[in-house]
Protein backbone atom coordinates (compact mmCIF):
# COMPACT_ATOMS: atom_id res chain seq x y z
CA UNK A 1 0.00 0.00 0.00
CA UNK A 2 1.46 3.39 -0.93
CA UNK A 3 2.70 5.62 1.85
CA UNK A 4 3.02 9.41 1.65
CA UNK A 5 5.58 11.44 3.57
CA UNK A 6 4.48 15.04 4.04
CA UNK A 7 7.44 17.30 4.85
CA UNK A 8 6.84 20.85 6.06
CA UNK A 9 9.73 23.09 7.08
CA UNK A 10 11.50 26.41 6.98
CA UNK A 11 14.91 26.53 5.30
CA UNK A 12 17.79 27.21 7.69
CA UNK A 13 20.22 30.04 7.00
CA UNK A 14 22.87 27.77 5.48
CA UNK A 15 23.35 25.64 2.36
CA UNK A 16 22.91 22.21 3.98
CA UNK A 17 19.43 21.61 2.54
CA UNK A 18 20.70 22.50 -0.93
CA UNK A 19 23.32 19.79 -0.50
CA UNK A 20 20.64 17.40 0.75
CA UNK A 21 18.28 18.11 -2.15
CA UNK A 22 20.99 17.43 -4.74
CA UNK A 23 21.69 14.00 -3.25
CA UNK A 24 18.27 13.01 -1.98
CA UNK A 25 16.73 12.59 -5.43
CA UNK A 26 18.89 9.54 -6.13
CA UNK A 27 18.52 8.19 -2.59
CA UNK A 28 14.73 8.46 -2.72
CA UNK A 29 14.58 6.87 -6.19
CA UNK A 30 16.87 4.03 -5.07
CA UNK A 31 14.17 2.94 -2.62
CA UNK A 32 11.21 3.39 -4.95
CA UNK A 33 10.12 6.82 -3.75
CA UNK A 34 9.17 9.76 -5.90
CA UNK A 35 8.51 13.40 -5.18
CA UNK A 36 4.85 14.02 -5.97
CA UNK A 37 4.71 17.71 -5.16
CA UNK A 38 6.89 20.64 -4.14
CA UNK A 39 5.44 23.87 -2.84
CA UNK A 40 6.17 27.18 -1.20
CA UNK A 41 3.89 28.92 1.23
CA UNK A 42 1.22 30.87 -0.65
CA UNK A 43 -0.27 32.61 2.36
CA UNK A 44 -2.28 31.93 5.47
CA UNK A 45 -5.23 29.60 4.90
CA UNK A 46 -7.24 30.83 7.83
CA UNK A 47 -7.36 31.01 11.59
CA UNK A 48 -4.66 28.48 12.48
CA UNK A 49 -2.90 28.18 15.81
CA UNK A 50 0.04 26.52 14.04
CA UNK A 51 2.72 28.67 12.47
CA UNK A 52 2.86 27.81 8.75
CA UNK A 53 6.06 26.43 7.25
CA UNK A 54 7.58 27.96 4.11
CA UNK A 55 8.23 24.73 2.20
CA UNK A 56 6.13 21.62 1.49
CA UNK A 57 7.37 18.40 -0.09
CA UNK A 58 5.18 15.34 -0.63
CA UNK A 59 6.97 12.05 -1.35
CA UNK A 60 5.18 8.85 -2.37
CA UNK A 61 6.70 5.54 -1.28
CA UNK A 62 5.57 2.09 -2.49
CA UNK A 63 5.15 0.97 1.15
CA UNK A 64 6.44 1.49 4.68
CA UNK A 65 9.34 -0.88 4.09
CA UNK A 66 10.65 1.29 1.25
CA UNK A 67 10.47 4.41 3.41
CA UNK A 68 12.27 2.65 6.28
CA UNK A 69 14.94 1.36 3.89
CA UNK A 70 15.55 4.95 2.73
CA UNK A 71 16.03 6.09 6.33
CA UNK A 72 18.25 3.17 7.30
CA UNK A 73 20.39 2.89 4.16
CA UNK A 74 24.03 2.84 5.34
CA UNK A 75 25.13 4.33 1.99
CA UNK A 76 23.28 7.51 2.97
CA UNK A 77 24.03 7.81 6.69
CA UNK A 78 25.62 11.23 6.06
CA UNK A 79 22.59 12.41 4.03
CA UNK A 80 19.96 12.83 6.75
CA UNK A 81 22.05 15.18 8.91
CA UNK A 82 22.07 17.58 5.93
CA UNK A 83 18.26 17.64 6.01
CA UNK A 84 18.19 18.06 9.77
CA UNK A 85 20.81 20.84 9.79
CA UNK A 86 19.42 22.57 6.72
CA UNK A 87 15.90 23.05 8.06
CA UNK A 88 14.06 24.58 10.98
CA UNK A 89 10.61 23.87 12.42
CA UNK A 90 10.55 20.54 10.60
CA UNK A 91 7.31 18.57 10.56
CA UNK A 92 7.23 15.15 8.97
CA UNK A 93 4.12 12.98 8.88
CA UNK A 94 3.36 9.69 7.18
CA UNK A 95 -0.02 8.96 5.60
CA UNK A 96 -1.38 5.70 4.22
CA UNK A 97 -3.07 5.84 0.85
CA UNK A 98 -6.88 5.70 0.85
CA UNK A 99 -9.35 5.31 -2.00
CA UNK A 100 -11.82 7.48 -0.09
CA UNK A 101 -12.48 8.72 3.44
CA UNK A 102 -15.02 6.07 4.52
CA UNK A 103 -12.44 4.11 6.57
CA UNK A 104 -11.65 7.25 8.58
CA UNK A 105 -15.31 7.89 9.34
CA UNK A 106 -15.90 4.21 10.16
CA UNK A 107 -13.05 4.32 12.75
CA UNK A 108 -14.47 7.52 14.18
CA UNK A 109 -17.94 6.00 14.60
CA UNK A 110 -16.51 2.95 16.37
CA UNK A 111 -14.63 5.15 18.83
CA UNK A 112 -17.79 7.10 19.80
Image (cartoon, helix red, strand yellow):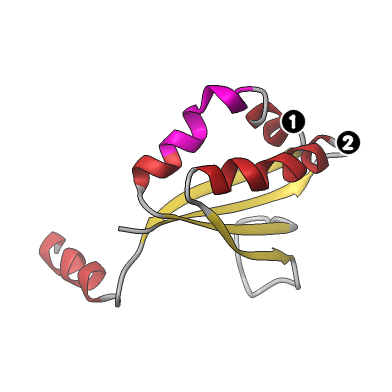
Point 48% across, 27% down: residue: 72
Q: Position of residue 3 (x, y in %)?
A: 39, 55
Residue 112 picture location, percent across and down? 14, 64
Q: CA distance from mark 1 to mark 2?
A: 8 Å
**Residue at (70, 55) in percent of width and height:** 53
The first of marks 1 and 2 along the sequence is 2
Q: Residue at x 71, y 71 (%)?
A: 44
Q: Are marks 1 and 2 in contact (CB under 8 Å)?
A: yes
Q: Considering depth in this image, is 92 or 74 the residue closer to the camera? A: 74
Horizontal arrangement in the rendering, residue 87 relative to residue 36 (left or right): right
State how many labels appear: 2
Q: Position of residue 58 (x, y in %)?
A: 57, 59
Q: What stretch of residues is rendered in magenta?
A: 68-77
Image point (68%, 49%), residue name: 9
Determine which residue is flagged by label 1: 85
Q: Quadrant of residue 109?
A: bottom left
Which is nearer the eye, 35 or 88? 35
Q: Secondary structure at mark 2?
A: loop
Binning the other alpha carbons within 10 Å of mark 1 as few (below 14), some (14 to 19) or many (20 upward) gives some
Q: Is residue 103 magenta?
A: no
Secondary structure under the numbered disc 1 in the rendered image: helix
Q: Which of the pair 30/92 is nearer the observer? A: 30
Q: Where the N terminus falls, by quadrant?
A: bottom left
* Residue at image mark 2: 14
Q: Position of residue 14 (x, y in %)?
A: 88, 36
Return the residue found at the far left. 110
In the rendered image, the vertical position of residue 46 relative to residue 22, given as above or below: below
Taking the image as shown, residue 78 lies to the left or right of residue 17, namely left
- For the question of whether residue 52 can be seen, the reply is no
Q: Where is residue 36, by image quadrant? A: bottom right
**Viewer can see residue 24:** yes
- Label the magenta part by its dominant secondary structure: helix
Amino acid sequence: MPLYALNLFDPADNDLYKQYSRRSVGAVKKHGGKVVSLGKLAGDAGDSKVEPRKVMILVEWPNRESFDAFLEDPDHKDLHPLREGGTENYLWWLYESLEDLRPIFAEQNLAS
